[in-house]
Image (spheres, rainbow, N blue to C red):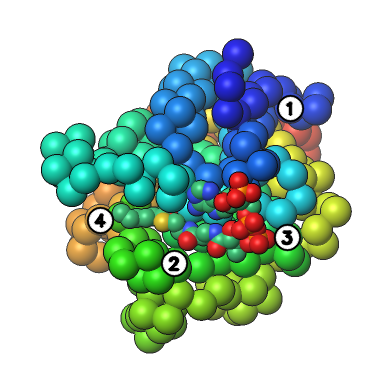
Amino acid sequence: SYETITAEANAQGHKGVTLLTINRPQALNALNSKVLEELIDAFAAYQADGSQLCAILTGSGDKAFAAGADIKEMSEKAAADFFLDDFFSPWTAEIVKKTRKPWIAAVNGFALGGGCELAMMADFIIASEKAKFGQPEIKLGVAPGMGGSQRLTRAIGKSKSMEMCLTGRMMAAEEAERSNLVARVVPHEELLAETLKTAATIAAMPPMAVIANKEMVNSAFEMTLDQGLIVERRIFQILTASEDKAEGMAAFIEKREGQWKGR
Ligand code: HXC
């Protein structure tokens, strides 16, 4: 059991869906070292559990997904501490890189600074109408440190990203959808139900194909078009050797649901 998050496998009866919730509503779910430590553990457990195939990360309470890295904790650190500890490095190294199965950020309110950056680490974002995104670090005399300048720019382009980072302004859900930062905006009260439904759809897919699709799309951000097309084609070719490919195609032809083996 955790202090700052909750984790539920087969969340609310949704088979294969793990729900992770940041649970520091009194601090608007600000991300301190304990949250990081516990999320690393919870993501590793999700990745290791063969019965789970899609995760959701959300924030508790009605106001925030996460209002950023914990400013009180950071205010006590010296530059040498940030540098020597390579502060913020584990978010990408331990969570993004080691989680091969998909996870969705369900953004239920403020996603600011590290909170916006954490949401952008997810495979995609579903946002409530009340969601607000921003990189306000400049107002604290610093700058994004968990990927904001890179992932936001890739998501919404230079002009909007530059404006957001330089002014620290917030972007509302409607603009975030128009700017391709989020996959979908849903009514606030329906956020969790809608995200659970989407996650359950993914969790019902053939597992190797789920992991392969995630890997392929991510390749588009890491390599040239030629390299990415080769990765795609090779992964496709490998999947054709799976039992689930034979089952999936047979099920289509026989007009029935596929029964996945995960092999
Ligand atoms: C620590 C935080 C926090 C944060 C909010 N709180 N954000 N604590 N770190 N990032 C705490 C407040 O101190 C307060 O606690 C409680 O949460 C409620 O916040 P309020 O400000 O009273 O709420 P409200 O007036 O509704 O304003 C909401 C808000 C504001 C607009 C989201 O809280 C805000 O601007 N927060 C900071 C956002 C931010 O700058 N994030 C980026 C952080 S830097 P108390 O105990 O006082 O009641 C970052 C990466 C840095 O993420 C990289 C640099 C290396």
Q: The disc labelled 1 sits on which kind of residue? A: Ala
- Amino acid tagged 4: Glu
Asked if the residue at tag 3 contacts the one at tag 2, i.e. Cβ–Cβ closer than 8 Å, the answer is no
Among numbered discs 3 and 4, the one appearing first in the sequence:
3
Residue wearing tag 2: 135
Secondary structure under the numbered disc 3 in the rendered image: strand
Kindly identify the amino acid type of the residue bearing the numbered disc 2.
Answer: Gln
Q: Residue furthest top?
A: 1
Residue lying at the far right of the rendered structure: 189
Give the mark, 2 or 1, whose residue is nearer the N terminus. Answer: 1
Q: State the CA–CA distance, disc 1 to disc 3.
A: 19 Å
Cα distance between the residues tagged 2 and 3: 18 Å
Q: Which residue is mark 1?
A: 11
Mark nearer the viewer, 3 or 4: 3
Residue type marked 3 = Ser
Closer to us: mark 1 or mark 3?
Answer: 3
Residue 163 place in picture, x, y as percent: 41, 83
Q: Is residue 250 left or right of residue 152?
A: right
Regarding residue 210, the answer to whether it shows in the image is yes
Q: Residue at x 49, y 32 (%)?
A: 35
Write down the residue under mark 3.
Answer: 128
> Which comes before the other along the chain, label 4 or label 1?
1
Nearer the observer, 259 or 43: 43
